Image: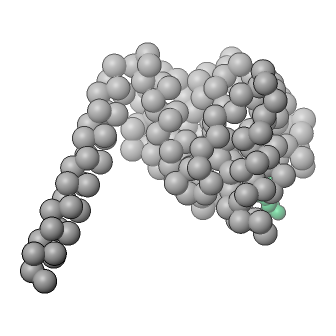
Amino acid sequence: MTAGKVAILMGSDSDLEIMKEAADVLNEFQVDCDIQVLSAHRSPELVSEFASKARDNGYRVIICGAGGAAHLAGVVAAHTTLPVIGVPMNSTPLGGFDSLLATVQMPAGIPVATVAVGKPGARNAGILAVQMLALADAGLAKKLSEFKSKLTESVREKNKKLQAQVKSR
Ligand code: RP5
């Protein structure tokens, strides 16, 4: 496991299916993480307490997923100098457009690195957290290079299959 750990917070347990993607990536890279339900609206004191103490408690990056009036990432960012990554949920009546705007439209001074809506965003949040930790961890940086090479290889394979199908027509 790496030195810094990552917190994954979500506004409700109904966000778990999506936010699990972030945890899966961190586990793949053997980065220490924990996952918790904390709501900016329903448990504001718990959020401010967690965020204020996060650095002292060994966290290095905080990933926040929330839907609708998705203020969790912004409120966490207001209480910490750690990097905060926001994942807008798509499980809302407005299909996540509401979550996206609520997460991304932060006022100057309090950044939230907002990723794509839903599962791809949650996966990218995990990868981005690994990239942040890899700034000070050569082993992790090497794993990221290997990860990128595998992505390239998977595209080569897909293209090879496609060309074979096209030729056999
Ligand atoms: C947000 O409200 C949560 O992040 C969740 O995406 C959404 C709905 O929450 P539940 O009503 O399912 O608890 O705060």
Question: Where is residue 162, by image quadrant?
Answer: bottom left
Instruction: Tell me what residue is drawn at x 71 percent, y 65 percent.
Output: 95
Q: Which quarter of the image is occupied by the C terminus? A: bottom left
Q: Position of residue 136 (x, y in %)?
A: 43, 16
Instruction: Tell me what residue is drawn at x 48 percent, y 24 percent.
Output: 133
Q: Nearer the viewer, residue 169 or 44?
A: 169
On screen, residue 132 above or below 46 = above
In the image, farthest residue toward the bottom = 169
Lateral position of residue 47 relative to residue 19, left or right: right
Instruction: Tell me what residue is drawn at x 60 percent, y 44 percent.
Output: 115
Question: Where is residue 36, by image quadrant?
Answer: top right
Residue 133 in view = yes
Q: Position of residue 24 (x, y in %)?
A: 47, 49
On screen, residue 55 above or below 117 = above
Lateral position of residue 124 relative to residue 72, left or right: left
Ligand 1 is found in the corner quadrant, namely bottom right
Q: Position of residue 71 (x, y in %)?
A: 82, 43
Q: Position of residue 108 (x, y in %)?
A: 79, 24
Lateral position of residue 77 relative to residue 126, left or right: right
Q: Which quarter of the image is occupied by the N terminus? A: top left
Q: Nearer the viewer, residue 5 or 94?
A: 94
Q: Nearer the viewer, residue 33 or 150?
A: 150
